[in-house]
Image (cartoon, helix red, strand yellow):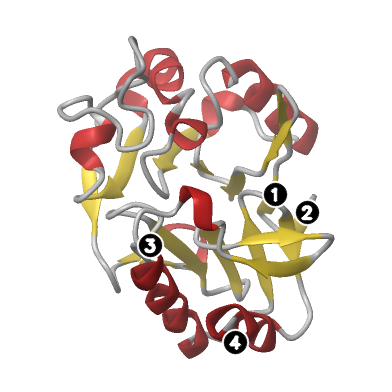
């Protein structure tokens, strides 16, 4: 689903789950935010082709956090793209993504996905890609969970900090949160932003009065 020019919310299916990585692009490059479950690289390639973005245009991957449905296809993509791709994540989740530590929620996996993180991100940092991407550290779901604010499009990529149902932000998915108090505090950071659209990895796109929807989640 096209959110605005150069911003596409992808939709991937995996054993009954629907997830929404986000694709950003311009004439020079493409950026993928989160990589789906293991084995979904070809699904991502097909989804990008449908939008008219060639897979070999992919130059940057930004990971919102370490969970397997977000980092699953990272090793395949890095192997395919080699040195042409740069991987970003928050420093607190980097060791889990690289396999230096077992994943916090899937630590019992025999062969968890793992791959390099080239550069770490911190709260308030701004990446110069696609009109400016502001990094918002939103811990709670994991220690290094980040959200991304696309300044040019007034769009928030919320990762797993919230979930939505039928276009409405419903709340925090408590069963998968490591620190619920921290997760609620993180959402307050969104109220300082001018947001017109939110992409939740689980649930997809929400529009409307975003501040009001987020306030309801914080106070619930």
The local crowd at label 2, few if under 14, some if 14 to 19, many if 20 or more residues have their Cα within 10 Å, is few
Closer mark to the observer between disc 4 and disc 1 = 4
**Residue 119 shown left or right of residue 15 in the figure:** left
Q: Position of residue 114 (x, y in %)?
A: 31, 22
Q: Position of residue 205 (x, y in %)?
A: 74, 60
Instruction: Report the disc number at residue 2.
Output: 2
Q: Position of residue 181 (x, y in %)?
A: 37, 72
How far separated are the C-alphas under marks 1 and 3?
20 Å
How far separated are the C-alphas under marks 4 and 1?
24 Å
Q: Position of residue 19 (x, y in %)?
A: 66, 40
- Image quadrant of residue 132? bottom left
The residue tagged 4 is 215
| Label 2: which secondary element | strand
**Nearest to the observer: residue 149 or residue 111:** 111
| Label 1: which secondary element | strand
The residue tagged 3 is 128
The residue tagged 1 is 9
The local crowd at label 1, few if under 14, some if 14 to 19, many if 20 or more residues have their Cα within 10 Å, is many
The local crowd at label 4, few if under 14, some if 14 to 19, many if 20 or more residues have their Cα within 10 Å, is some
């Amino acid at each position: 689903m096209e959110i605005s020019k150069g911003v596409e919310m992808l939709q991937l299916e995996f054993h009954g789950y629907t997830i929404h990585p986000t694709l950003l692009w311009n004439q020079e490059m493409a950026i993928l935010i989160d990589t789906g479950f293991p084995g979904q690289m070809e699904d991502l390639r097909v989804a990008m082709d449908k939008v008219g973005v060639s897979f070999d245009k992919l130059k940057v991957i930004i990971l919102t956090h370490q969970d397997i449905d977000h980092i699953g296809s990272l090793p395949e993509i890095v192997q395919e793209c080699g040195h042409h791709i740069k991987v970003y994540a928050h420093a607190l989740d980097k060791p889990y993504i690289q396999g230096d530590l077992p994943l916090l929620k899937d630590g019992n996996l025999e062969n968890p996905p793992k791959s390099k993180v080239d550069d770490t991100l911190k709260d308030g940092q701004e990446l110069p890609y696609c009109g400016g991407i502001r990094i918002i550290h939103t811990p709670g779901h994991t220690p290094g969970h980040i959200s991304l604010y696309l300044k040019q499009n007034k769009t928030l990529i919320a990762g797993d900090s919230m979930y939505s149902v039928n276009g409405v932000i419903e709340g925090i998915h408590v069963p998968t949160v490591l620190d619920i108090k921290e997760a609620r505090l993180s959402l307050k950071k969104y109220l300082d932003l001018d947001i017109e659209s939110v992409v939740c990895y689980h649930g997809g796109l929400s529009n409307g009065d975003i501040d009001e929807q987020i306030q309801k989640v914080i106070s619930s």
